[in-house]
Amino acid sequence: MTLSSDLDRYLSHPLVGLDQVVIGADVLDSVHDIVAALPAHDSIAVLTDEDVYTTGSGTHLKPAVTALLETLGTVTTVALPGHVHADETTVSAATAGCAGADVIVTIGSGTLCDIGKVAAGTRPHVVVQSAASVNGFADDQSVLLINGVKRTAHSGWPSALVVDSNVLEGAPALLNRSGLGDMISMFTAPADWYLSSLVEMDRGYSAEAATMTRRHGAELLGLAPGVGTSDPESLSTLAKFVTLSGISMGVAGQTSPSSGMEHVISHLLDMANTARGTDTAHHGAQVGVATVVVAILWRNMNEKLRTGSLGTLRLPEPEDAERTVREAFDWMDEGGSTSNECWSDYSKKLEHLRAVDAGAKIRDAAAIWPAHAEVLSGLLGEPEAIVAALHAAGAPTRFSELENPSKEDDVIWALTNCHLMRNRFNIADLAYLTGAWTKSDVLAALAEAELIGAGL
């Protein structure tokens, strides 16, 4: 199976609601035909931001798309101001701005697409990608800020994606490199999902969804130099990767195929920056840097399980756990809404782990760890290979190399507390609950990362 054939095959999967994907050179005009084929298109809302997008050939993207649409009906532009976040206020403004339109056409980033998927509801939604920056374009879920906390909510599938390589070529190189970083999560996230299945979490593990993009991992790593130089063919292939990855999340019914500990670290860093009133780093670039540290933790925990040196899994008492969560997050807002939101989700995780006797399940899994390790060998990647690919693309490998980098203390805070944010089980949970993810363990992992050119 090739990447392209897998993409074609899974577009017809019964759980996938994405009708059409057009990726390649000079395909921007297909927006006209896609919208023209819809049953109703007299009123079209163009949802975008205030940024200017220029293609590799110098064309301004938004006026070009708007001109195509104006031949079909009345076009209303809904431009969200400033640095767009998918918070409650912004999502409400987008929804109100798009009210009454027959069709929503979103032009821009993954965050705009997430907002557009909510604003469109059940109406046709066509997305014109401005970069291959994240994998969240091609799924039925949106990452939203709820009470200051990054949460994944089911929204709607876009009807169609239009990804022109000339548009990708014109995007800032750091955005496409960010897309590579987001895809790098394939070397840790599916392993986290498999681990969660050992304690019966995350609504079931699907080997099909977990390996949909992961089986093409070697091709992704080889793509890195071309992404770094904004080679149009390489960017088109990267777009296929991020699209197939998004589809895998739709097939799974959750983001677990591509979102594990590395994504939670990124979410916490975003939350910290937002709480401090500072700009956030690009999501995918941050994920790529975090993935290196997670791969190191996975390697270390794998060794503990292989040698039988894993500590006993102990669940904290609810009152102790709540105190820990609140100590981690209360600083973020005066009213405590962030810690309330995090405790709401984390308490559910603890209740589940207690109900299924997670300690016994981990002991049982450890007793036959070679069988699990064999599965994980096809899911995990070596941190050195991840660093090499990021270097080849000119992408950050250290948190300090990100644009809008977080404070060093915030990075350590995010790594230390990432397991406390949501109702999912990943390698940080296993490490923490077995006494292997203290602040000193975090610092040791960062020191290991430093030896291979990554980390802080």
Image: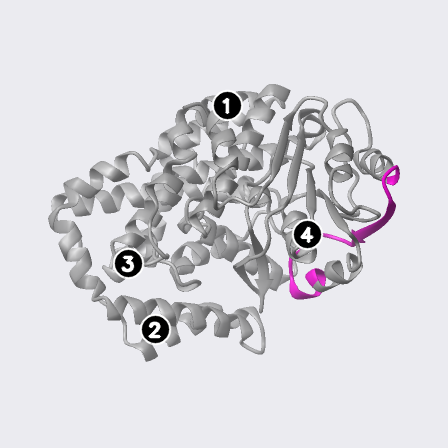
Res 72 label: none
Could you say whether the residue bearing mark 1 is in a helix, strand or loop? Answer: helix
Percent position of residue 430, x then y: 28, 56
CA separation in Å, label 1 and label 3: 35 Å
Percent position of residue 355, x then y: 25, 70
Give the mark nearest the N terminus, 4 or 3: 4
CA separation in Å, label 4 and label 3: 33 Å
Task: Name the residue at 45% across, 56% down.
Answer: 414
Give the mark nearest the N terminus, 2 or 4: 4
Give the mark nearest the N terminus, 1 or 4: 4
Q: Is there a contact, CB below 8 Å, between mark 4 and mark 3?
A: no
Res 321 label: 2
Position of residue 368 relative to residue 59, above or below, is below
CA separation in Å, label 3 and label 2: 21 Å
Task: Name the residue at 57% across, 33% down.
Answer: 177
In the displayed structure image, the side of residue 315 where residue 454 appears, left or right: right
Stretch in magenta: 70-91
Could you say whether the residue bearing mark 2 is in a helix, strand or loop? Answer: helix
Give the mark nearest the N terminus, 1 or 3: 3
Q: Is there a contact, CB below 8 Å, between mark 1 and mark 3?
A: no
Could you say whether the residue bearing mark 3 is in a helix, strand or loop? Answer: loop
CA separation in Å, label 2 and label 4: 37 Å
CA separation in Å, label 2 and label 1: 43 Å
Res 223 label: 1
Pointer 4 residue: 116
Give the mark nearest the N terminus, 3 or 2: 3
Position of residue 371 relative to residue 59, above or below, is below
Q: Residues within 10 Å of mark 2 (few under 14, many from 20)?
A: some
In the rendered view of the protein, which quadrant contains the N terminus?
A: top left
Q: Name the kind of residue labelled 2 in the image.
A: Ala
Q: Is residue 231 visible?
A: no
Task: Name the residue at 52% across, 29% down.
Answer: 8
